[in-house]
Image (cartoon, rainbow, N blue to C red):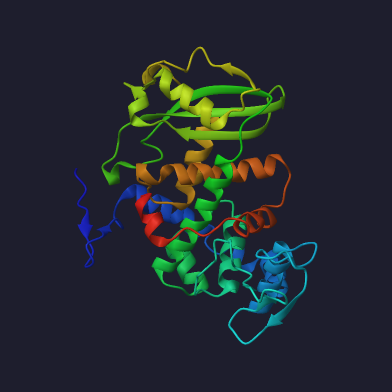
Amino acid sequence: MDLLIQLNADGSLDLSNHPKVQARLQAMQMSADLFTSSAALEAFQERFHSEEACADFLLARKWPHGFSCSRCSHTTAFRITTRRLPLLQCVQCHYQASPTVDTIMESSSTDLRKWFTALFIVSSTDSSITARRLSAFIQVTYKTAWLMLRKIRQSITQADAAVKLTGAVSLDIAHCGDDLIPTLYGESDVFPVLIGKAATRLDQPDYVKIQMVSESHYEDGRVLPQGIKTFHDQHIASTAAVTTSTFGIGARRNTVQTDPLVKQASAWMQRTFLGLKKQHLQHYLNEFTWRLNTKLRKLPLFASLLKLCATTPATTYAALLKQY
């Protein structure tokens, strides 16, 4: 029997009766408030208890060895505290440096505590978080929460693009689509992704990339030579020793089994998100691999994400929309 999908008053889809949605909502509800009662959250809130505490952290991160003016390189400044966020004014050239300059928080009117809380939640929950849940948790509008998460994922994407796989690198293909993009969005096509793994020892990867292949670089599920070359040029160092799967690359989609990493990525996304459009998928794949790579290197997720977002220049709302 066909399912009736109704529209809400604002024109959005009402998916409450869809069986796939109901199953995922139940799974989400089971873990909905895990982070809110954790001791880690209490410790975080105690450390970053005020705007000033958050600003001081950013200033210390920006100048770990003491202030240095970006205009004249002078090393002495005085603190201005008459604004929402403190400023450091260079004694020599009078340039005023904000703690949020060259961070994803630059020019944002949202409190730093809410930004830091969002970073903590993203990094401390295994399943990430939706914009709707984040907006309710930190008391901002849905649009603000969406923009915050989008900027966080943009910083992850930029950081991943700057890393090239080195050493012994294996390159393989997998196909995805239905699991990551539910048919309730009307996008049921299956498409290839390329998986690159850099390893110091056999079967011990220390960095992983999962990249979608441009539609012009595959045909009937087969990745064309240009698609392989593009991945090599953008993501693999010229000195790497690359092993390419003779089974996956160039094979048709019905002959290729789903890679375990893609299965893990699919399960991770389905735990939190009701559905993703194809045009958004790469950012979520990048978040998944960032989590994996950070754990492989045994680094703390929150500290790593905070450092990343504190060193990534902000992208404007208009620029972010162009990428969608």
Taking 132 as reference, is 311 left or right?
A: right
Taking 9 as reference, is 166 left or right?
A: right
Q: Residue at x 32, y 21 (%)?
A: 219
| Residue 130 image point, x, y percent | 46, 58
Q: Residue at x 77, y 68 (%)?
A: 75
Q: Is residue 91 above or below residue 65?
A: below
Number of marks in the rendered image? 0
Q: Is residue 208 visible?
A: yes
Outermost residue toward the bottom?
82
Q: 84 or 16, which is in the foreground?
A: 84
Q: Residue at x 35, y 52 (%)?
A: 322
Q: 251 or 240, which is in the foreground?
A: 240
Taking 289 as reference, is 180 left or right?
A: left
Taking 215 as reference, is 158 left or right?
A: right
Q: 127 or 285, which is in the foreground?
A: 285
- State the quadrant of the N terminus: top left
Q: Is residue 113 above or below residue 5?
A: below
| Residue 128 image point, x, y percent | 53, 54
Outermost residue toward the top?
246
Q: 152 or 301, which is in the foreground?
A: 152
| Residue 155 image point, x, y percent | 54, 52
The quadrant holding residue 144 is bottom left
| Residue 267 image point, x, y percent | 49, 41
Q: Is residue 34 visible?
A: no
Q: Is residue 149 above or below residue 111?
A: above
